Image (cartoon, rainbow, N blue to C red):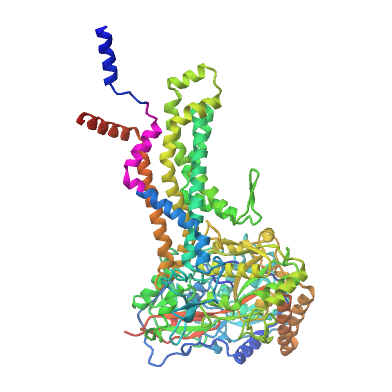
Amino acid sequence: MAAVAEQASLTELRPAVAGRNPWALAWRRLRSNRIALAALGLFILIVVMSLAAPLYAHYAHDPNPFTPNLNGTTVINGKTTPILQQGGGILKLGETPIGPTWDLHNYFLGADGIGRDVGVLLLYGGRASLQIGIVSAVLCCIGATIAALFAGFFGGVTDAVISRIMDIIWAFPVLLLAISISTELLTHSNGFQVGPLHVSASSLWVPTLIIALVFVPYVYRPVRGQVLSVVNKEFVEAAIAQGSSNFRIMFSDILPNVVSTVIVLLPLMIANTIFTEAALSYLSVGVQPPNVSWGVIISNGQELLYTRPWVSLAPGIMIVLTVLALNVFGDGVRDALDPRAKLRVGTGEAAAGSGA
Amino acid sequence: MRHIVPKVVNLGGGKARFAGLAALTVLAMAAAGCGTSTSSSNKPAAGTPVSGGTFTILANSAFGVADPAQNYTLEEWQLLIDSHDGLVTFAKTGGVAGTKIVPDLATSIPLPTNGGKTYTFTIRRGIKFSNGQVLKPSDFVTTFERQFTVPGPTSFYSGIVGASKCSTKGCNLSQGVVANDSNYTLTINLTAPDPELMDQLSLPFAFAVPSNTSTKLTGNNVPPGTGPYMWKSYNPNTEAVLVRNPYFHVWSKIAQPNGYPNEIIEKYGLLVSNEVTEVQNGQANEVFDGDQIPSDQLTTLNSPTYASQVHVNTLTADWYMALNTQRPPFNNLKARQAINYAANRTAYVKIAGGPSLAVPACQILPPNYPSYVAYCPYTTGSQTVWSGANLAKAKALVKASGTLGDKVVVNSTNDQVGTALAEQMVADLNSIGYKASTQLLTAAAQYPFVQNSANWGKWGVAWSAWYQDYPAQSDFLNVLLGCGTIHKNSDASPNIAAFCDPAIEKQINQAETLEATNPTQAAALWTTIDHEDTNMAPWVDMYNPKQIDFLSKNVHGYSWNPQWYILIDQLWLSK
């Protein structure tokens, strides 16, 4: 009896071992990373500001933010001022748009070369850049993950064919490939079909799909590697032995074990795709006017760098902040999900425990 | 010539022309005061010119292949006129006098015989090429045969007897270009009278090269010429260098005077903004006048500091939006007229750099051009000067045309100006009820794209620009809007709008015939054709551009020729 009582008291003394969900652990680690959370906050702020573009346009009395306003006027300090001002001197060469007024109601960041409010365009440009960046990164990750699952699970010819296709895409420089595809698609003025969807040549879907496509190999490779490392594990063999379908094994057994890699890659891919969109739009093969993105605005401002640097600087700063926020946040996510990070956290917890 | 992009254009043949046109155009341009400079005189500056030094030009990009039989760019032409000569040439002087055609390697301009189909030139003796070879009449046979064996705009000389059988594989013009090296004569036989032959012989394509020059493309090696300079080297990635031709002597000061700089260098691959800065700092002498100075740097040039260094000249050129007359909505006259009424030409002028750099236009012929009579039906006020868009009339016309709500694709180049023009055109189209979008292509791709009929279904409005090849009315009215210049499935079809009106075409032929018998009546008929073309609205003519020459402080002797623009070798450098 004494032994049983002793056993019972030991059981009462030992704390219950709670099962730890790996996602909860990751979230816990991420929450403790304040720099990553600050970066996430900054990114969310940029997203919210961009989504509020129509509200700001209304606030700034700019109902047609994309329409050129070369002959327009505005009131600055009670004085009616042309938005584009002719050069002075004897020759009167050139037309210069008004600079920043620092008045949120009225051309806060000045006008671009065709008289549009840069502040309003900046927010609308953010909507396009973020939409393209996020959607293309998500599409890219989904496509790459599916391809990696098929290649890694089936192996053999399937793996060889898919991997060689990825190698071909990989072999082209990203921008060159994107420019080539974009230039070709832009000349199809009547648009083109993507499955059941009809995409017009000037649609934001064109740069979105192109950017998604050119980055697929960059996600495919690491995910395929993960799939290959998982596919021969015992639980997969057990699932096969139980007669599970291939589809079920891939998406119910393997996918949950590789998805952390995809999640780590996603914010970094968004940063990459935003950069790529900006580059393509700067080269006039991304977002097509009259739509704007940050890259388009930088391009519009490059001839005004001496006199109206804010036209290019403002979207440049927005890109830097967005990409920086995503990279820092992406690092935080990686630290939270990476097994080595788990070891570090575990060691820390152990140390904390022993200390107690 | 559209000198924004190097190009090869098939100008089409079969036109009846007459040699009297050149004299007529000179008179007309003189009357119109062509080539006026708004900032400073285009006559040589005061002071004693001095020879010597290196004149450095900065250019954003090179002009492609340097072979004079192929190159069709102002950029190379401005150098080729200093290194080569033709039978005749435009007088190498500034102002209106520069539109006059004068004998160069020929001793005089011959009168035609054989019903206007034969011209016999006497060639000057004692002239040597820069490699020491003596110039002979037979050198011209090679020169003209190379027009056909080297891929280029051969149609300028397609009226020469035997030319129709020439191709890139071979050419025999022994019947069309007959050289007699013993008595130094050269006879050119044509299949039909050509009123523009002297203009065409004045172009660099017809500049003499030695008879032993390869009949194939010489690439970046410019064959020897007879001018005051010779090409030492040309690398499109770095620079072109011209040095003095040791065998040159002056035979006609008005045709080919001696140059002042010892060396002319054109450097490539710089940003235009850097070009401006270098010239401002005196590190180079000229920003190539085909490079568009960024708008914010233009404002810095307004400073009194640069007043003597900036020269602005009116060009005989059109910047326009061609309307696709082969597809809806602009196969409908009312729709074409509607967008002409709606076009905000003040906005287009602002995009071009403001009223100091462009003039709003409605008609095809540019101001200061032969047969130009101001005409602008697409405005609110008078019928001569554009004073504002007439949106009410435009909307009524769109409604009457039944094209309201149609989709329109506006094709343009993806550079700053091309993009801005396209965006303004989209706004103008949307303002009268169309659903417009842009289609922006690189400059190199855009021009062939819009010329090719295979792409007619892909655009509704296309940006383009045209600079005169030589001062003849047909260079605008026939080349750009004649039925004969629509070449289906070709990238060289300069009638971008694919506009063809049989009644106007008949008048074009009539005007060309009349030039032989009644030049005054022909000029009046060209005016009528210009106005009729404008009424048919195949384009939205936006503006006539002006051009800026920006030179360093130590450059003197600026003169501006309406044909060649800045005369580089006539500039001299002070210490």
Q: Position of residue B507 (x, y in %)?
A: 77, 79
Would you place residue B239 above or below residue B17 in this image? above
Point out residue B500 in the picture as x, y percentages from the top left corner.
75, 70
Q: Is residue B494 visible?
A: no
- Please count the marks in the image: 0
Tell me the quadrant of the picture where the C terminus of chain B can be found: bottom left
In front: A130, or B372? Answer: A130
The image shows residue A134, relative to residue A236, as above or below, that is below
Q: Nearer the viewer, residue A260 or A27?
A: A27
In the image, B437 versus B165, the foreground residue is B437
Residue B381 is situated, as x and y percent measured from the top left of the image, at: 67, 86
Residue under the image location 45 percent in, 87 percent down:
A90
Q: Quadrant of residue B34?
A: bottom right
Q: Quadrant of the N terminus of chain B?
A: bottom right
Residue numbers of the magenta segment:
A19-37
Is B534 part of what is drawn in magenta?
no
| Residue A29 lies in the magenta stretch | yes
Q: Position of residue A188 (x, y in %)?
A: 63, 55
Along the horizontal axis of the image, is B315 left or right of B130? right
Q: Is residue A154 above or below residue B303?
A: above
Q: Locate residue B446: give its quadrant.
A: bottom right
> In the orientation shown, which residue stands out farthest toward the left?
A355
Which secondary structure type mostly characterizes the magenta part of the structure?
A: helix
